[in-house]
């Protein structure tokens, strides 16, 4: 139980840091996302404490990255510029690696909803046009933290 709790806290602290960096620099560093993907896949493939089945972790990592990569490519074809950074795709892949494909899809849905609302409010507050970019990583991190907490055995024991 303690190992699970410590892993979740470490992931949450990492996500808070990544959200802060992305908010200020429009960048999610690979030196964090690559290890998150690798350790999530190793953890769920070999640990007796796995948070999801290994095949769901692998599908989550592959699908998480691929989906945002495809969306970015489609956006680039239409608008002739990138719509997402690939750090966002790697972060979603990390969520898939740790929590599985189902959780990655919920995280993306919640991040898209909160990102739409939060992004529009942020642009309005900053007096920027709707076409101005804003970081998506903080919204992915927010949604991921909710899913990490929601799937915790500690939370389930309190409910």
Image (cartoon, rainbow, N blue to C red):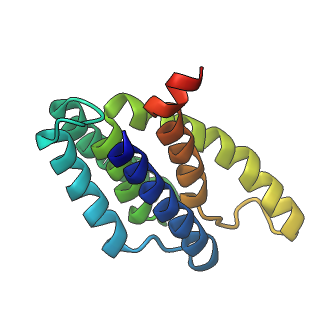
Left or right, 150 with respect to 118, comes to left
Which of the 4 image quadrants contains residue 85? bottom left
Q: Position of residue 58 (x, y in %)?
A: 19, 40
Q: Is residue 61 visible?
A: yes
Residue 80 visible in the snapshot: no
Of residue 120 and residue 144, the one placed in the foreground of this image is 144
Q: Residue at the bottom extreme?
A: 25
Q: Residue at x 32, y 50 (%)?
A: 93
**Residue at the image point whose x is 88% and y is 69% from the top:** 127
Please indicate whether residue 64 sits to the left or right of residue 133 in the image: left
Quadrant position of residue 16: bottom right
Say which residue appears at 41% left-offset and 64% top-offset: 87
Residue at image coords 43%, 56%: 11
| Residue 14 left/right relative to 112 | left
**Relative image position of residue 97 (x, y in whole percent):** 28, 45
Residue 109 screen position, x and y as percent: 54, 35
Percent from the top left, x then y, of residue 81?
49, 66
Count all numbered tags in the image, as a single digit: 0
Please determine whether, in this image, residue 103 is positioned above or below residue 80: above
């Amino acid at each position: 139980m303690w190992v699970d709790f410590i892993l979740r806290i470490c992931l949450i602290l990492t996500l808070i840091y990544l959200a802060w960096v992305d908010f200020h620099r429009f960048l999610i560093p690979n030196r964090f996302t690559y290890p998150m993907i690798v350790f999530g896949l190793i953890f769920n493939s070999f640990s007796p404490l796995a948070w999801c089945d290994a095949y769901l972790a692998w599908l989550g990592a592959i699908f998480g990255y691929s989906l945002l990569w495809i969306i970015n490519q489609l956006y680039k074809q239409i608008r002739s510029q990138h719509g997402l950074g690939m750090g966002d795709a790697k972060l979603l892949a990390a969520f898939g690696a740790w929590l599985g494909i189902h959780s990655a899809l919920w995280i993306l849905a919640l991040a898209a909803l909160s990102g739409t609302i939060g992004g529009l409010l942020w642009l309005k507050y900053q007096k920027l046009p709707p076409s101005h970019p804003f970081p998506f990583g903080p919204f992915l991190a927010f949604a991921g933290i909710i899913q990490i907490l929601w799937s915790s055995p500690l939370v389930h024991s309190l409910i």
